Image (spheres, rainbow, N blue to C red):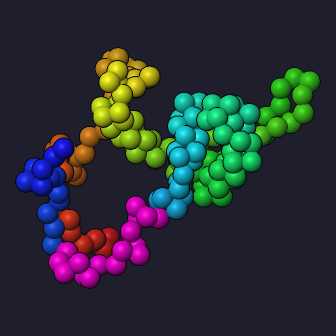
Amino acid sequence: MVGMENAVRMTGRLEPRGAWQADRCTIAKALDVIPTRSAFLILREAFYGTTRFDDFVARVDISEPVTAARLREFVDNGLLEREDYREPGQRTRQRYRLTEKGAQLFPALVALMQWGDRWLDDRGGPVELRHRECGERVAVELRCGAGHAVIPDEVDLAPHRAR
């Protein structure tokens, strides 16, 4: 266990804490869009290429009503879109595809995967992400606007600047 003297924390200029409003917290808002374990796992499957309802049910191992509710929420929130398809001799069905908004969640899911691989599985997890061009492993890393790699101890918490 890490002692408090070794705790990682951001420095900041938001004192007193009442100088900003937590009701605008975008982490909380993101968790309103992806609120459950099943939601994260459905997103995982969408990134892995799953598109069909029955495949989401089987791969995530959740009930059809829960899968339907999560997929509907993702469509309503603009993370997935429905697309009609028809296999020869079959009726028209719908498949799900990530939108640009949904695809932008990829680094967040990779960060969770990377953390889980390091801290929750001695073997490093069941799959690896590799760069198609060179074959090297893919990792999430914080970088500032100038391109410098940044660790949490080097991050200042500051009020949002209007654009």
Question: x, y percentage for residue 29?
Answer: 47, 64
Question: x, y percentage for residue 5?
Answer: 7, 54
Q: Residue furthest left?
A: 5
Question: Residue at the spot x=16%, y=67% of the render?
Answer: 12
- Nearer to the camera, 3 or 106: 3
154 sits to left or right of 81:
left
Question: Residue at the spot x=54%, y=51% of the render?
Answer: 36
Q: Quadrant of the C terminus?
A: bottom left
Question: Residue at the spot x=33%, y=38% of the render?
Answer: 115
Q: Which residues are magenta?
A: 14-29
19 in magenta: yes
Residue 98 found in image quarter: top right
Question: x, y percentage for residue 154?
Answer: 13, 53
81 in magenta: no
Q: Residue furthest front?
A: 1
Question: x, y percentage for residue 28?
Answer: 43, 64
Query: What is the chief secondary structure element of the magenta stretch?
Result: helix
Q: Is residue 43 visible?
A: no
